[in-house]
Amino acid sequence: MQYRRLGRSGLQVSQLSLGSWVTYHNQVDTGAAREMLAAAMDAGINFFDNAEAYAGGKSEVVMGEAIKSLKWPRLNYIVSTKFFWGLDREGNSANRKDTLNRKYLLHAIDGSLSRMGLDFIDLVYCHRPDPHTPIEETVWAMSDMISRGKALYWGTSEWSAADIRAAWDIADRHHLHKPVMEQPQYNLFHRKRVEEEYARLYQDIGLGLTTWSPLASGLLTGKYREGVPAGSRGAIESMGFLVKGLTDTAKNAAVAQLAGVAAELDCSLAQLAIAWAAHNPRVSTVITGASKLSQLHDNLGAMAVLPKLTPEVMTKIDLVSAPLTN
């Protein structure tokens, strides 16, 4: 496993990381999570991604219990969480959901710490932008979270370049803790934000990336070329919004062509897609997901594919995928 700095911070994160969206609690219990976390750590992964909203907070519980049972030294692993959607969406408080106001954020970090059984979270993200709360209020709250020792670094997820820069400028002006990282979707079919919109932020403010969905929710595994298979992510009722994209005819035709490239490199489609995302030097870490140990091991094989991504191979991949990207 190779390691990269998280933006301009001194924190070293593994090039591949392991996330819990969809899987933890829904498909993976504490025992299975423990097994996969242990295998990931053995392979050199040191970053494990989570969010308050995943499985209504239960994903944090599963990860926390699994990590506690593994008895890892706290310095050896990095965990994250993300705030915006809240948990008790039926509550009678207007400050429970879809917000980044100070009251919600300072309650949210305490909830995550309790569910994960930790004294601090390494990385905390504003999970989406909040157009109804001044960015300045959010920046102060996130900075205070770090000053109070409840988190070490903060960042954003799916924010526009303009809002990230605004947040950074506010923090700089008031000598607050600045946003260090962004967590955007990044894969062969979703790349313009990372490659174009954020381009100036890498040099100007040293933005680091912890990217998600390298397999486009499974599309880039090839499993959806004949429809939605039983037991897949697309077959989960709560994931129904993904089906249209997963069964897109043009993209699945491109996936078939990419399978030929993968065969030439003697790797799986998933390994090719993950290696492609990790090949971008602006990406600090690629967050992978797995519902079983065999998937985790296959994903880890992407590290062996990276040296094979020559300029010629990258051009071949672009010819197939670039016309369909957004």
Image (tube, helix red, strand yellow):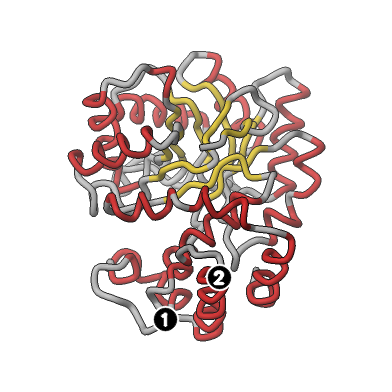
Q: Nearer the viewer, mark 1 or mark 2?
A: 2
Residues at marks 1 and 2, CA–CA distance in whole angstroms: 20 Å
- In the shown orientation, is residue 246 left or right of residue 67? right
Locate residue 264: give its quadrant. Answer: bottom right
Q: Residue at x 76, y 31 (%)?
A: 169
Three-letter code, disc 1? Arg
Please state which of residues 35 and 236 is positioned toward the viewer in this rendering: 35
Q: Position of residue 166 (x, y in %)?
A: 74, 38
The answer to whether residue 317 is above or below residue 9 is: below
Three-letter code, disc 2? Glu
The answer to whether residue 255 is above or below residue 123 is: below
Please state which of residues 199 and 280 is positioned toward the viewer in this rendering: 280
Q: Residue at x 50, y 44 (%)?
A: 127
Q: Residue at x 53, y 84 (%)?
A: 253
Q: What is the crowding at mark 1: few (fewer than 14 residues within 10 Å), some, or many (at least 20)?
A: some
Q: Position of residue 23 (x, y in %)?
A: 30, 52
Mark 2, secondary structure of its residue:
helix
User: What residue is shown with label 1?
Assistant: 225
Label pair 1/2, CB-CB below 8 angstroms: no
Q: Position of residue 66 (x, y in %)?
A: 24, 32
Task: Determine which of the numbered discs, if any, sits on residue 290 in the image.
Answer: none
Q: What is the crowding at mark 2: few (fewer than 14 residues within 10 Å), some, or many (at least 20)?
A: few
- In the shown orientation, is residue 326 left or right of residue 216? right
Mark 1, secondary structure of its residue:
loop
Q: Residue at x 74, y 47 (%)?
A: 162
User: What residue is shown with label 2?
Assistant: 264
